[in-house]
Image (cartoon, helix red, strand yellow):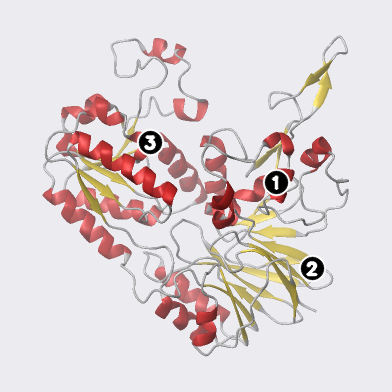
Amino acid sequence: MLSITGFGGVNEIGGNKFVLEDGKSRIMLDFGLSFSTASKYLDEFLQPRKLNGLLDYQELELLPKIKGIYRTDYQKHTNSSEPEEQLEFDALFLSHAHADHASYIHFLRSDLPIYGSEATLAVLKSIEETGAKGNLDLYTFTNSFQMGKTKDGRPKRLDSRDPGIVVPRQIRPASFQKPTQIGDFQVHSIPVNHSLPGCAAFVIKSPDGDLAYTGDLRFHGYGGHLTEEFVKRARGVKILLMEGTRIDKKETKTEEQVKTEISQIIRDTKGLVLANWPSRDTDRLWSIYNAAKENDRLLAISTKQAHLLEQLLRSGADVPKLDDPNIRIFLTRRGWGLLGSECERSEIDRDYAYVKWEARFLDHKNTVTFKDIRGDCSKYVLRADLFDMTELIDVKPPEGSSYIRSVVEPFDDEMNVSEQKLDNWLDHFGLKKFQTHCSGHAPGPDLEKIVREIEPEIVIPIHTNHPQKFKDLGFNCKFLESTKTMTF
């Protein structure tokens, strides 16, 4: 019999963690962070302790208590439970690389096969390589709390520089062309449009009936046709795990409308244009790139975004190339701040300010510094979020400059505090602020259209605060309860 257990993404937006079983095989669909649970207890400076392994996370119900899935180094270090020698899951399938679907991969065993699109895996790799140290074992696995011995036999702690400490995860690209067979499950990965490259939905065929899992999706992005194709291929499934983030919203702004608004703001700005957008949203990147190009401006991105584009290009994703004549890589000063000075390059290298992944961009032909931007502000659109505001002290944006905020509006106290700080910076430098954004999720009418066209026997609303609204539309719904198994 086919069974589904929801360990996240049930009566909440995000935190997706679903287990699918048929008595022979057991697979997971996503393994992400629950923002709603985390925000109840944690903030930027209050986080679970790594020294306590899984315990802090499980105490706060951020991680479910599931056997045979978690990394054994953490369990052994805390003596929290007897680590299972046997891996009890066959695979994890990732719909995409947003934190609420993928960030808790860090806690999973290194021998668990992880399937995702080439672009999704590229995003995970970029996050791991460019992120601050912490819970970022997304693409590789660093054995923690390992002890060894010095040459004279004394105990010593081992770290990532020691042989055998960093090992590869079982990363396996999921083809969009052919299904992946896991026991009796035949998993078809189907591309859909969302606010991230490489997003997939899944149609899973089994002897007990077919199931479709939408992940997150929309029609109105540049890849909206992909979502339409998924709907066709999912038609007639027995069970539809249906995301409902915006089931209570009637309409939405489209990506094309956002691009048009951004282009007009750039056209009306005489000085520097700064823009903030979700760093991994390549649809938005294309919108701002094209808007800048239409107005004869160069788009200057961060080194972290350059690294992401580099990885995505290797995966075959459709993103701007780093040697594109309309792209620039903005180098910020580090360490002693020698970049942009008259010091020799060798002195900048000796500053040890740039980590390995970032240092390789120093010699790229398309780099610019604050001096280049300050020399001709009207020539650039510069990416900048709150954490980049100190760069304005060097850039010195002239009167008539603008700031385009192309991210979601603040929706909690922490975000409101950050937004006030941003406003203070913009006021200090006299920048005019504009807001234009669209969601990566389909609105209510589009979600209803998806379900009506697929015509499943059973709809299971997930990733939503309003699951009842699907039943109100007349669909045959079943509602998961967190950690409770539903059998079909």
Q: Kindly identify which residue carries mark 1.
A: 107
Residue at (68% x, 47% y) in the render = 57
Is residue 384 visible to the viewer in this orientation of the structure? no
The quarter of the rendered structure image containing the N terminus is bottom right
Mark in front: 1 vs 2: 1
On the rendered structure, is 430 left or right of 99? left
Mark 3 or mark 2, which is nearer the start of the sequence? 2
Residue 277 spot, x, y in % from top left: 35, 49
* 241 over 262 or under it: above or below: below
Which numbered tag is attached to residue 387?
Answer: 3
Mark 1: secondary structure: helix
Instruction: Give the residue drawn at x 37%, y 14%.
Output: 345
Q: CA distance from mark 2 to mark 3?
A: 47 Å
Of 367 and 152, which appears nearest the observer?
152
What's the CA distance linking mark 1 and mark 2? 25 Å
Q: In the depicted view, which residue is nearer to us: 353 or 406? A: 406
- The reply to whether callout 1 and callout 2 are in contact (CB within 8 Å) is no
Q: Which residue does the numbered mark 2 point to in the structure image? A: 183
- The amino acid on which the numbered mark 1 sits, given as a three-letter code, is Phe
Q: For the C terminus, which image quadrant?
A: bottom right
Q: Is the residue under label 1 in contact with that under label 3 (CB below 8 Å)?
A: no
Q: Are marks 2 and 3 in contact (CB under 8 Å)?
A: no
- Height in image: 261 above or below 430? below
